[in-house]
Every structure is written in C-alpha cells, then in structure tokens.
Image: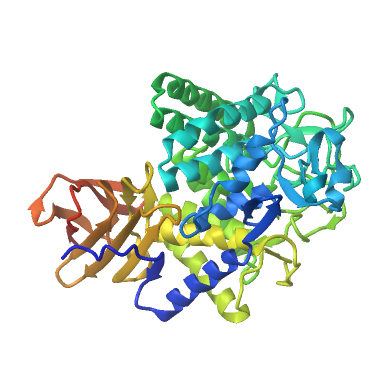
Amino acid sequence: MAEDKQIPEISFETGDPRDAEFFRVLKSIVEKDCKVITEGERKIHTHPDWVRDHIHEMKAWKWWESDLSSFIDRLIELQPARGFFHEILSGLKDYHAGFVKPEFVYRDEANGVQFIRLELEADIEYLMVEAAYFIWQATGDKQGTAKRLPALEKGLRYNMEDPTRWDPEHGLLMRPFTIDTWDFTWGVPTSNRGIDPDMPMAIMHGDNSGLYRACLQMAEMTEAVGDADTAAKWREKAEVIRDRANKLLWNGRFYMHEYHLDPVDPGCDESDMLSLSNTYDINRGLPTHEMAVSIIDEYRERGKRSPGANADWYTLDPPYPIFAVHPWGEYINGGVGSFVAGELAKAAFRHGREDYGVEILRRLREITEKTGTLQFIVGRDGRDLNWGPRGWGAAAVLSAMMEGLAGITDKSALFESVEIAPRYPAAGMESARVCLRYGASDAYVIADYKHDPQSCSIRIALFGSPRKVSLHVLLPEDATPAGASVDGKQVEYKQVNVEKSVYCDFTLVRSGDADSVAEVAYRV
C-alpha cells in the first residue's frame, strides 16, 4: 500500500518511549527559541535573533518551520557595499551597538529596530551561505536561490579579500585572537567587539572549515541554477582552502586552537588545547577520514580521563587561566557544551565510531531525563551557567539523531536524492521508524527499519519524496553482506568498511509514488 498522502510530521520512533520523549524534549527546546520580530509591516521570523544562533538551530527547525527566509533575506537586503552581513536584530536600546563602529550598525528608527554586526566575528558570511543552502534544500526554489547568490558571493569575497579578514601570507581567513569562534578578544575589554590595528590576530581552524564548506555549498547551489562553470571554480577554491588549512593548522592529532599572527603571551601552553570547532571541522569535511578519526578519539580519550564530568564535551581543553572575564573552566573557556556533544556524536556515527555516537546520545538523554531540558553550556561541576541559546545545542543533538543514528541525509533538494545510512545495530535497536520533512514544502522521507537477527536480514521500507536513494546499511558486529534486493529483485552491492564497521552499499531508484522496500542479507 502506498503511504497516506497526508504529509506526516517529523518523528523519531524506536519502540522505546524514552527515545520518543528525548526527541520531544529536544524539539520543544528548539521551538522555544523561535521569535517573530516586527519591522513596520514586515514580520521577521528569527530562531533566535542572532543570525549565527538562528543558522545553527536551522539544522533542526528547517524540518518543521515554514518561514526559513525572512531573516536571511532581510540581512541580504541590508548588506553594505563592503560586503559583510549584520548578525543581531534587536531593539534600539541594545548595548551591543556601542561595542562597534557606526559602520556596523543599521538603525531603523521609524520601526524601533536595529541590525548590528560585531566586527570581530569571522563566521557570519560563511554561515549565511549555509542558511541559503538549507533554504534551497527545503524549498527547491531555484529562482530565490539565484537571487541570493550574488550577495553570498560578495560576502565570501569580503572574507577572502578584506584586509581585516584575509591573511595574504597564508591565504586563509583570520580573526582577532578569541576563544575559537566566540566574540571577545584577548587583552581587550569585552565592550570592544571591533577590529583595531593593534589587536592580536590569529587564524582559527573553524573559520576556515566553515569557509571551505561554504565554497562547496556555493558550488551546489550555483550548479542547481544552471552555472556549471562557476560551480567548478567554487570547488577549486574550496580545495585550495582545505589544503592550506590542513597543512598549517593540523598538529598531528587535531587542529590547533589558534595560529597566532602576532606575538601574544596568554600565560599558558596552548599546544595541547582542543577547541570546540574541531567537531564542526569534521562535519564540514575539512579533515580526511583518518584525521577525523584522530580528532574523535582525542575527545573520547579526554573523556576517559575525567569520568562523570563529560570531559569529552569541553568547549576548550585545557582552558586558559582566564580569558577576558571568564575564569578557567567557565563558559566558553572550558565549560561543557551540548552543541559540542551533538556535533561530536554526528561525527562519530559517520567515521566508524558508531558505538561512541550512541554513548553520547544516551548520556544526553539521561541529562534531559534528570533536568527536563538540555543546557547550552554547563560548568565543569555541572552547574547551569545560563549562557547561550539552549536550542543551539538541542538542534545539534537532533541532527546527530536524525542524520547520524537514523542516517537520513538530503543530498540534493526536497529529498529527491538522499542517503539512508541506518546505524541502529550500534544501539542494539531492531526496529525504528523515522520521518524527516521540510516545513516550507511538502517534501518528506520516511524510513521504516526492521532487523531480524534470526533470518540475518535487515529490511528498510521507504516512503515519500526520494527518487534516488543511496543505501549505506550498517551490519551487526562480525557480519558481512550476503545479498541486497530492491522490491524483491536482487541488485548489485558492495561491502564498505569504515574502520571496523561493515556496511552494505547499494542504490535504489524510485519512480512514481509507489513504496519501495530495500533488504540486506548478511552472514556471520
């Protein structure tokens, strides 16, 4: 029977009510960050009202919200000639406007709002590309995408040409010396979020993994609107950035915290500092698989050294004695971040450390069961520091569940081409039914998974929008594939080893609205 034509809601069901409740709590946390801000007759949907947070949370809320573009498109409208984007939408009394030069503030006095850019931030332009990419995937709107591309390109040129952003010697994106991607500078009052000539500058790995990924996303969107030649140039730019970053910033185990361009003495040895963007680097594709595994194992090993402290989710380890106003182990100077946990779990699922991904999700589930929520950052002693948007962390964890454990990834737009990579054997799950959908369109995909250890078979029923499905099916431990079929017909497959994990890979092509069933047989 074909799936009911009524568009289903996003869901995560395994038969265990604890998993369903965990999903519900996470989704609720993200939903609570949604705001509607009025600018004259314009309604701007933010999630929340700093566009960085809005975009990081978009990893989850793109699956149920209908308005993905009003905030992004307003920032594009306001893009100054220099090429940067504003990031904060607030009332006229927001004190952040006093932290930067007037150039970085747009005040709409008539409507009582202002748009602010903290100049030192180096991530906004590449995150705006990610937002446009999510909008394209969720809507399939090629015309709207084509309209956004010139502004996005202008923003990336600002990243790669403006003397406050680009280090010509190393050919990489730079920023003032901050903790990872955060917004306060070493040796400067926190009321100064600008870039001054005497500020110490540095190259941070996460900025360059973000720029690398943005170039690839520009290539995909440009190709989608019919410009293959420009898409090829974006891919070339991406590989140049990747090569430069990996040569300069890799310390043999992970990416160094900061590569200093100016002399600075932070009062400690920085050589062993592991900072949060290492997890983002993996999911953006900057490191090779071998490098990604090294980073994941580094986090895991640090967690083992401090059992019970969630030490593998530190924002920075070891911390600085003090950075700006933040003491050792507090806030971004070494606190424990749920967003780090979510990104780390997703990376683990994709790089042959599936058991570790499961472990992280279960620890996170236990936290929500005890507290009823998931904090953004807690102290090393577990205290809620009440800093930052909880939805950012919850969205990262939802992404790890849906795209990591369930393994459903949109490889194009509107779920027309997807990867289904269920990793349930790592969690001991024999059945699951997961639905992803886009709130801005009717596109959706359902993957109904059943594993029968007695017959050594895995069955995946697929419903919804996909036309091409790349299956990447994790097998139980010590198993190898013995066959694959689509709708009862045998198909070619191959065994793919990811570290010690064994997958069965094959392709399913659907036509029309008929349901499809993929099956894998294995031997032990």
Q: Would residue 230 be found to the left or right of residue 370 on screen?
A: left
Q: Is any atom of residue 267 visible in this view? A: no
In the displayed structure, does residue 120 sit left or right of residue 279? right
Quarter residue 422 falls in = bottom left
Left or right relative to 460: residue 153: right
Q: Position of residue 129 (x, y in %)?
A: 56, 37
Q: Position of residue 176 (x, y in %)?
A: 79, 36
Nearer-the-camera pick, 367 or 460: 460
The residue sitting at 75% across, 46% down in the picture is: 179
Question: Where's the N terminus, which quadrant?
Answer: bottom left
Does residue 489 lie above or below 145 as drawn? Answer: below
Residue placed most toward the observer, 32 or 314: 32
The number of numbered discs placed on residues in the rendered structure image is 0
Q: How far across and down, in percent of the image, does residue 28 sit?
A: 55, 70
Q: Is residue 110 above or below residue 439?
A: above
Position above or below: 375 against 479? below
Residue drawn where x is 18% and y is 47% of the image = 511
Quadrant, the C terminus: bottom left
Front-most of residues 336 and 129: 129
